[in-house]
Image: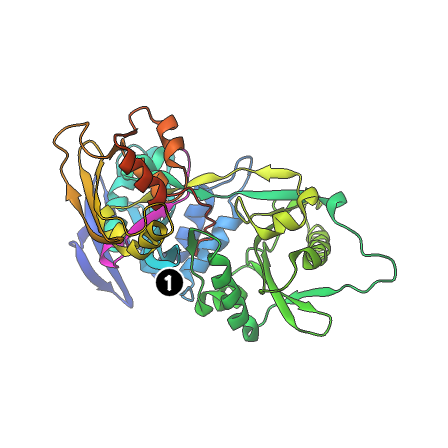
Amino acid sequence: MARPWALVFPLGRKRKGERTVEMLEDLGDGLVLRRATLADTEALVAFNADIHRGAGMEGPNPYVAAWVQDLMGGGHPTFAPGDFTVVEETGSGEIVSSLNLISQTWTYGGVPFGVGRVELVGTRPEYRRRGLVRRQMEVVHRWSAERGELLQGITGIPHYYRRFGYEMALELGAGRSGYLPHIPDLEAGAAEPFQVRPATPDDVPFIAALDEQARGRSLVAAVRDAAMWRFELAGRFDEKQRPAVRVIERAGGELVGSLVHEGDLWKTRLHVDAYELALGVSWLAVTPSVLRYLRTAGQAYQERPGAARFEAFMLGLGTEHPAYRAIPDRLPRVHPAYAWYLRVTDLAAFLRRIAPVLEGRLASSVAPGHSGELLLNFYQEGLRLVMAEGHLETVEAWEPPDVEAGGASFPGLSFLQILFGYRSLTELEQAFADCRVNTEEARVLLDALFPKLPSRVWPVE
């Protein structure tokens, strides 16, 4: 259905009936870039479900359809319909390209900072290679900066997002799997020592506290506050796409942990998004009960029309997790990490934000109370870090006079890989021949300030 207003409205905000449409740019060739409105919900659901079909998927992607419905439904704690950008063909009124920005808070060593998560990037095949994604990226990067977000992140296909200033620099998607024979049966006549039940709104404070506790094991983690947990419990559109939020109790009703798994099988596997126990509770004791619960849940899901047979469970909890150590022989398959794409436009500002973490690392290193200067050469630009008695007093831009200047040199955006603990300095040197450490002092300081550490980011979506 054509929309005549798209042809005649100048850029800016205009009202048609009860709807305000914010036109962002006339792209020429009959295309306009604008913010989405609530009235676009049906079209955005259909567009994204079609564009983002999974490998071998014959019809529209129901998982993506439900996700878009959740985002456009008005109840999401950090997202509004206008956080989608839309490229519209004015003659037909069709959406030909779109993406969105999901604002959230992450932590680095416990220090919170704002993040703009870019997602659901898609363009119809006949409109690709026209720079439509680039124009939309410029818009959402500006929105993110206006919101005070120091970082943008995206999960996506290899290499593509490097062209927009992103680097693959943070652990993503690691986990371990087991199969039905790895789930221990309860001994005959024994009572299940721990029960898993659906969470209620009254459980939200307990779940949120455990989530905060779990973040302490991860260099970088996403924050889920009480509002987000309430949304996970009851705010999502499709029950099958809604995470199944559970609490774990002793036989007497004492809360001891939380568990989140997907609301449906992924092929033959049930995926666990989160599993946490209160301090002082034994992972060795509780985990067998959790596995038996997962078996019951998976077998229930396999009875749904069109479902595959339940055969496996995956703890998608990062490269390291206490549950892995509690049941090592029951998790034979290891899923290696992929990587988040990260974009940090003001690296100095980010380092200043996490200065307490860096100072703490320095204090526990071989150089506590260090005073001195560390010059980082990124070949076309650089950073100057000044430490005084163990405190990071200055982080500022520095212009290298030549390619060999400074304490260490990092090509492209590769420094982000050690900043976010994805690689060690030695691994980075092995991966990039032009990553060079020029002084012994620089090596000691870089190893102290930026060690390789695990991260598990379960993002707000």
Above or below, 368 against 249 in this view is above
Above or below, 186 against 331 in this view is below
Residue in the image at 73% along x and 55% along y:
292
Q: Residue furthest right?
A: 189
Identify which residue, 308 or 228, lies in the foreground.
228
Residue in the image at 17% along x and 33% along y:
380
Per the image, label 1 sits on a secondary structure element best described as: loop
Above or below, 65 against 158 in this view is below
> Tag 1: Cα neighbours inside 10 Å, few (<14), some, or many (≥20)?
some
The x, y position of residue 436, in whole percent, is 28, 28
The x, y position of residue 418, in whole percent, is 36, 40
Identify which residue, 164 or 4, lies in the foreground.
164
Q: Quadrant of the C terminus?
A: bottom left
Identify which residue, 258 or 135, lies in the foreground.
258
**Quarter of the image holding residue 437?**
top left
What type is the residue that disc 1 sits on?
Answer: Thr
Report the side of 44 relative to 271 (left or right): left
Count the marks: 1
Report the side of 305 relative to 159 (left or right): right
Report the side of 276 relative to 426 (left or right): right
Whether residue 363 can be seen here: yes
The magenta stretch is 144-158
Q: Is residue 253 found inside the magenta-colored segment of the image? A: no
The residue that label 1 is drawn on is 78
Above or below, 226 against 188 in this view is below
Q: Residue furthest top?
A: 433
Identify which residue, 326 or 255, lies in the foreground.
326
Report the side of 304 relative to 404 (left or right): right
